[in-house]
Image (tube, rainbow, N blue to C red):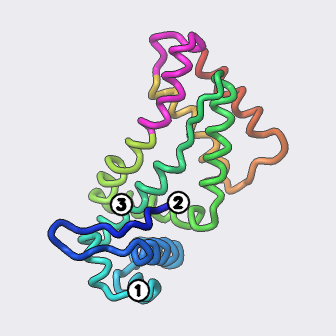
Amino acid sequence: MQTSTRPSRTSGGPVLQAEVTDAIRNAYFEELAEVGYGRLSIDAVARRAGVGKAAIYRRWKSKLEIMVALASDVAVAAVDVPDTGNLHDDIREYLASGQAALTHPLAQKIIPDLLAEAARNPTLTDALLSMVQNPRRAKAAQLVERAIARGELPADTDIGMCLDLLAGPLYWRLIVVQDGPEGDYLDRLAGKVAAAMKA
């Protein structure tokens, strides 16, 4: 993900250097993938990033806050909803970007761990829903809304159901079954999802 090189400033505080923020972000995800959210410590992230803990706490107040902020940045940016002009191709492009995000080596370790941790940690669940899942679904909803505006889907289309159809099958295949799509799988899946949305 591209980040600004311009230093930012906390409210009334010191200038935050972008390269330090990037180092912390990378270290956080690497540590999270290695040990999981439950065992992750700010001390370990600081050591891996080569910074002091104060550099982290100037940016985020807690392990939960850094998790939600960084996960939100990455997960929402990964939702790509280009307007190709038709529903099938919009879905195909969405699935392709989803595949790229979900097959990243860190994502394949982090996502299952976060889901397991969220089942034990209601605070984490609430934070991930409000800052990650809900914004992702709102962004993906543009794909369905465009199809409605073009007349490809009826005006009373259940957008929430369409989003479930859009995200569920690929996630199941890549994260749960851990079997990568081959050949024309994404094209065929896009056709099935589009047909289901129209049904």
In the rendered structure, does residue 155 fall within the stretch colored magenta?
A: yes
**Marks 2 & 1, CB-CB < 8 Å contact:** no
- Crowd band around label 3 with a 10 angstrom C-alpha radius: few (<14), some (14–19), many (20+): some
Give the alpha-carbon distance from disc 3 to disc 2, as whole Å.
14 Å
Q: Magenta residues?
A: 137-158
Locate the C terminus and report the quarter of the image it occupies: top right
Kindly report which numbered mark, 1 or 3, lies closer to the viewer in this rendering. 3
Q: Find residue 173 and report its horizontal and vertical position in percent.
A: 67, 48
Give the alpha-carbon distance from disc 2 to disc 1, as whole Å.
23 Å
Q: Find residue 31 and report its horizontal and vertical position in percent.
A: 48, 78
Disc 2 marks a residue whose amino acid type is Met
- Crowd band around label 2 with a 10 angstrom C-alpha radius: few (<14), some (14–19), many (20+): few
Q: Is residue 135 above or below residue 27?
A: above
Question: Which residue is rendered at x = 31% and y = 54% of the image?
Answer: 127
Q: Residue 195 is drawn in which quadrant? A: top right
Q: Secondary structure at mark 2?
A: loop
Q: Find residue 33 and report its horizontal and vertical position in percent.
A: 52, 72
Q: Secondary structure at mark 1?
A: helix
Q: Secondary structure at mark 3?
A: helix
Q: Residue 55 is drawn in which quadrant? A: bottom left
Question: Which residue is rendered at x = 46% and y = 20% of the image?
Answer: 158
Disc 3 marks a residue whose amino acid type is Ala
In the rendered structure, does residue 83 fall within the stretch colored magenta?
A: no
Q: Please report whichever mark, 3 or 2, sits nearer to the chain's N-terminal start.
A: 2
Identify the residue position indicated by label 3 in the image: 69
Identify the residue position indicated by label 2 in the image: 1
